[in-house]
Image: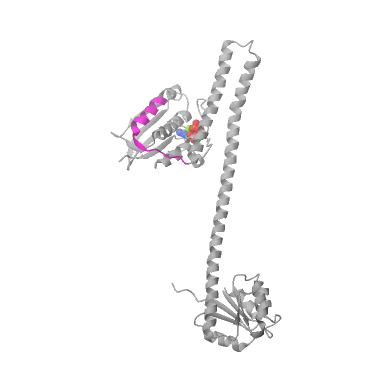
Amino acid sequence: MKTPKPIVLYLDDLKEQLTNFSANFFDVYKVHTANTTAEAREILAHHPVQVILADYSLVEAGEITNGVDFFESIMSAYPNAIRMLITGQGDKEVAVNAINKGRVFRYIEKPINDEELKMIIDGAAALYLAEERYRQLLATLEDKVKERTARLLELNAEKNEFLGIVAHDLKNPLANVKMFSDLMHKDVETLSKEEIKEYTGDVIAEADRMFTLITNLLDVNKIERGFKAQPIRLDLASITEAVADNYRGRAEQKSLKLHFESKTPQANVMADEVATMQVVENIVSNAVKYSPNGENKNIWVRVVPSDKAFRVEVQDEGPGLSPEDKEKLFGHFARLSAQPTGGEHSTGLGLSIVKKMVEAMNGKIWVESEKGKGATFMVELPAAP
Ligand SMILES: Nc1ncnc2c1ncn2[C@@H]1O[C@H](COP(=O)(O)OP(=O)(O)OP(=O)(O)O)[C@@H](O)[C@H]1O
Ligand SMILES: [Mg+2]
């Protein structure tokens, strides 16, 4: 790409100088000339001038009668242009002074031949371009810093919200533990064995609830600090079948029929064993947790082959998910329209953990569901070579 010509403005109150300058440099620079300071300002306002040359003596140029004052007057509006002063023999001292005060980049002493002048202007234009690149870099960096700061603020707000929910979720069971213990403590002489059994049972249930929440929180924390899956060759069918067997009893308590079926002779995947188990457990436990209690509904757990992968499908006849539910499903503390139907606890963290785990194993998780028509959760893990 041809580099565009440097854009140069030359201000002098002597017309003849301007004409000469234009004639000598029009083929190497985009030259603007101004006979008065007003004209020069007009040009600056409409053209991206990179280098400004002004004669020191501007007796005829308008209200301002020297180049240094002119530069001073435009400095704040056009700080980036490289300013150079053309001086006669007697003006050296003012020029040096102007340089020291930052109004002028350098001075050029007359008489000067065209070749030298060209070298100086080229140098100034190169400096302008270098500074421009630097300014752009700085602007990009500033944008990035702004973006990151915004993201950090967002994350911080998320963490605060997270903390608020955790504290809230721990408070209720803790209050119950305190209440049941208080009761027992106060009435220790009069309570029957049955009552003590009931109250301690309640304390245990509440402690379990807190324990689940804490375990999930630790999982979230572990995953957010970067969960590293340790993939090994696993038979997804036998893991899934074991989980299904494990949940069949709980399903039957709610009159749910839990079916297992493997549609593939083998289902060898490369996956982390503990994580895979946790993933399958969460979607099977959800199907049991959110299916209607006592209505003889079905849950189908299937293992099916897919493209270079194997898939676990868990289909239920529960309440399903609305479009808004689906949007929030894999977020933290997603307690959505479906609520546990058998007194189970719900932290709303399970699927957020599961999703990260599945992704860390290069797998996929998604749901197909319509409100009122059941849900099918699908987890796909890469097939072992
Ligand atoms: N099979 C399902 N049918 C209908 N809604 C479901 C189903 N599975 C999950 N949900 C909804 O999604 C929400 C999030 O599920 P998730 O597994 O993340 O949390 P949880 O089951 O509430 O708690 P946890 O898994 O931590 O015990 C649930 O609260 C429930 O409202
Ligand atoms: Mg769950």
Please provide the residue range marked out in magenta.
Answer: 226-246
Quadrant in which residue 356 is drawn: top left
At x 41%, y 36%, the residue is 376
**Depth order, front residue of 138/300:** 138
Relative to 235, 37 lies left or right: right
Is 234 included in the stretch rendered in magenta?
A: yes
**Depth order, front residue of 255/379:** 379
Q: Position of residue 150 (x, y in %)?
A: 57, 51
Q: Position of residue 331 (x, y in %)?
A: 51, 40
At x 67%, y 84%, the residue is 90
* Quarter of the image with the N terminus in it: bottom left
309 over 7 or under it: above or below: above
Q: Position of residue 259 (x, y in %)?
A: 37, 28
**Depth order, front residue of 260/235:** 235
At x 45%, y 30%, the residue is 285
Is 87 included in the stretch rendered in magenta?
A: no
* Quarter of the image with the C terminus in it: top left
Relative to 217, 257 lies left or right: left
Residue extending furthest toward the bottom:
16
Residue 57 visible, this orientation: no
Residue 272 visible, this orientation: yes
